[in-house]
């Protein structure tokens, strides 16, 4: 058996449905309801004025909903690939423990050896990257899959394959 290909899997906007929580918090703090269509093409911080404060609050990353389909598909991928979950978490020191405990709760088959919290994903070698941000995808040397979120939905002319769900990732990598 050859070496398994290594896949870097992002957390926020890929495994963790952060937008779900952003919408809830925006409504509870401002009383106004934002919809998906209101924020297409906007950066997260432009769409949600409270975001910088939210992500720096201890506990925020502990209760983010899991992205639909991600548990089932990542478990399948984990049998055929060398999966590494990578998050630029050191930007938010309060997030480190929250994120690791969240992974333990929701993706118990991902061991502590498969988790990298960093400030720069370009230093990590792998074959495939699944991420929602161009700042990570554009600098990656291997295959790239852009997970579609409101902020990147309008970006059509990129070299990255697009996936708007974990079912799409399953089709791209397991069929
Ligand atoms: Mg992300």
Image: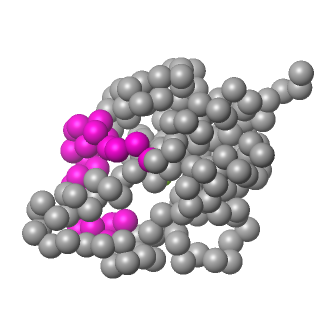
Residue 63: x %, y % from top left: 28, 39
* Residue 2 seen in the current view: yes
Vertical arrangement, residue 125 with respect to residue 54, above or below: above
Residue 40: x %, y % from top left: 42, 76
Q: Residue at x 52, y 42 (%)?
A: 70
> Is 54 contained in the magenta span?
yes
Residue 1 placement: quadrant: top right
For residue 106, side relative to residue 22 (left or right): right
Name the residue furthest right.
1
Query: Magenta residues, as a range?
Result: 44-67
Q: Residue at x 50, y 50 (%)?
A: 14
Q: Nearer the viewer, residue 168 or 28?
A: 168
* Residue 135 seen in the current view: no
Vertical arrangement, residue 8 with respect to residue 27, above or below: above
Badge count: 0
Residue 72: x %, y % from top left: 55, 36
Residue 103 placement: quadrant: top left
For residue 166, side relative to residue 65 (left or right): right
> Is 166 contained in the magenta span?
no
Residue 49: x %, y % from top left: 23, 68
Q: What color scheme is it?
A: one colour
Q: Residue at x 64, y 77 (%)?
A: 156
């Amino acid at each position: 058996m050859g070496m398994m290909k290594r896949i870097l899997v992002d957390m926020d906007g890929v495994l963790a449905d952060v937008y779900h929580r952003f919408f809830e918090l925006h409504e509870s703090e401002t009383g106004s309801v934002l919809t998906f269509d209101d924020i297409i093409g906007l950066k997260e911080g432009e769409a949600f004025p409270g975001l910088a404060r939210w992500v720096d609050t201890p506990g925020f990353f502990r209760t983010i909903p899991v992205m639909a389909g991600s548990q089932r598909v990542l478990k399948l991928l984990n049998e055929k690939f060398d999966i590494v979950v990578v998050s630029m978490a050191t930007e938010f020191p309060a997030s480190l423990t929250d994120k690791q405990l969240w992974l333990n709760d929701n993706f118990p088959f991902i061991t502590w050896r498969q988790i990298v919290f960093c400030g720069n994903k370009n230093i990590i070698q792998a074959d495939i990257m699944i991420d929602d941000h161009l700042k990570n995808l554009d600098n990656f040397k291997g295959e790239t899959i852009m997970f579609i979120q409101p902020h990147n939905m309008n970006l059509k002319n990129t070299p990255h394959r697009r996936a708007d769900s974990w079912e799409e990732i399953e089709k791209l990598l397991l069929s």
